[in-house]
Every structure is written in C-alpha cells, then in structure tokens.
Image: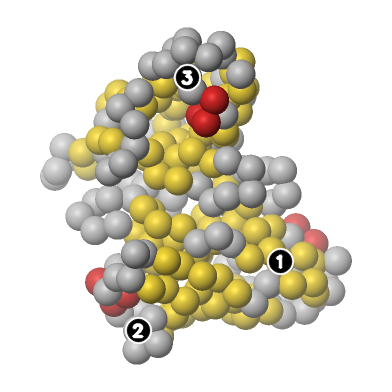
Amino acid sequence: QVLLVESGGGLVKPGGSLRLSCAVFGFTFNDHSMNWFRQAPGKGLEWVSHINTRSTYTNYADSVKGRFTISRDNDKNTLYLQMISLRVEDTAIYYCARRGLGERPDDYWGQGTLVTVS
Amino acid sequence: DIVMTQSPDSLAVSLGEGATITCKSSQTILYTSSNKNQLAWYQQKPGQPPKLLIYWASTRESGVPDRFSGSGSGTDFTLTISSLQAEDVAVYYCQQYYAAPTFGQGTAVEI
C-alpha cells in the first residue's frame, strides 16, 4: 500500500525556518520523481518544488526560489523541504506527492502538514 | 507559466443529474511525441488531499467510478459527472503537467 507521511510543520515567526519531511512506504522511492505542493487556507493548489529520481534536477516556483530547498534521501525513502526566510504568505498545508511513471501525473499524495507563519 | 482557467467556480446539481466542468489552458499541453494531453483532474474533499480522477485528459484512474469522464485536447478540456452522487460533493481541480504544474482555481460541486 502506497503511503506518504509528511511531518515537520508548525508555527514559526516571519523570517524563521522549518524543515519538512515526507516518509514514503509501499513503493520503490528511487523510481519516482517527487513534488511538493501547498494550499493556503481556503485557497487553491499551488506547486512548490520538484526533484528528479537522482537529485540531479530540481525546480522551484518563483514564489519560493532562493528560500526553499528540496532534497531526498533514497536510502531513507524520505523527501525533504528546507524552508528559510519564511513569510506570512507561506502559511499553508504542504503536501508531498509522487509523480507517476510514464507521463502520469501526481498519483499519490500525503495527508499534508500545516505550516503557519505568524 | 501555463495558466489554467476553470469554469464555473461553483455548481449546484441535483442528485442523479449530470455536471460539467470546463478547463482551458493558455497554451497547448499536448505532447506531440506521445500524442497525450498532459491534463489531470483531481477531486478534493474537506480535510483531505487531492485524489487523482483522470489523467491524459480522458483516462480514468484505477478505482474511479465510470460516472466520471474526461474529454478534450490541445487547450480545451471537460470533466463530466454523469449522475451525481452525494459522495461527489467536493472541489474539482484541473492540472497541467506539461510544464511546471499549474492548477485551475477549482470548481465547488454541491447538491
């Protein structure tokens, strides 16, 4: 059974830092590229960052570029998002998601972890 | 960025009736090499993450009821729910994954 479990969210002051983790289970982690998405309270979905299977390619939304860093540890089956210089507008539920194989989209999502910047 | 525009923003449908949501992309999202539109539809219920319903614009994800169907190509796409059930009350999003993913603003479907 495929499972993604985020952790690391919480309350942080503007300018602060947090590191989110996403532990995955039930599939071969290093076969899949991964994404982070977020959803501000009562708002729509926003892509945040992408990493390929071997960490040789990463990409970021303009809104987080230079402040967030995505990484992964294939030995630990874990995805990370290091966030610094947090802003009030970064307040959101952060989801990790597995990109499907063969041109499939993000097919499995975690339950999310709430980050509140206040 | 590829802009995705959904309509309507909300939709009230009677049980058993049909519902149609449209999604338009600001540029084509058809991979010519595979001839597959990089368009997905997601369903999100309160307090839950998005659930994948449809990909390649018209391929139903495993386990998704066949009352959900997708159509369209190029820049214009449609999600149809043929006979609304109570459990279909949710917000529906289209997503393009041709480039860095972007979503429509969402359509809230209610009874």
Q: Name the residue under label 2.
A: A74
- Residue A49 lies, with reference to residue B27, above or below; the image says below
Please, is residue B65 above or below residue A116 in the view? above
Task: Give the percent coordinates (x, y) of residue B111.
Answer: 61, 18
The reply to whether residue B2 is in sight is no
Say which of B83 and B43 sits in front.
B83
Q: Do the residues labelled 1 and 3 touch (CB within 8 Å)?
A: no
The answer for which chain carries disc 2 is A
Residue type, numbered disc 2: Asn
Answer left or right for A80 relative to B108: left
Q: Where is residue A91 in the image (x, y as percent from the top left)?
A: 73, 60
Name the quadrant of the C terminus of chain A. bottom right
> Residue placed at 45% from the left, 36% from the top?
B94
x, y percent for residue B15: 53, 14
Q: Quadrant of residue A77?
A: bottom left
The 10 Å Cα crowd at callout 1, few under 14, some 14 to 19, many 20 or more, is: many
- What is the C-alpha distance between the residues marked 2 and 1? 25 Å
What is the distance, in whole Å, between disc 1 and disc 3 at their CAs?
Answer: 35 Å
Residue designated by label 1: A115
Residue type at the position of mark 1: Val
Q: Residue under label 3, please give it.
A: B84
Marks 2 and 3: in contact by CB < 8 Å? Answer: no
Q: Which residue is at a point 40% across and 44% down the rendered structure image?
A: B52
Q: Quadrant of the N terminus of chain A?
A: bottom left
Q: Earlier in the sequence, mark 2 or mark 1?
A: 2
- Do circles 2 and 1 both sit on a common chain? yes
- Total label count? 3
Residue A64: which disc?
A: none
Amino acid type shown at disc 3: Leu
Element class at badge 2: loop
Q: Position of residue B104 (x, y in %)?
A: 52, 36
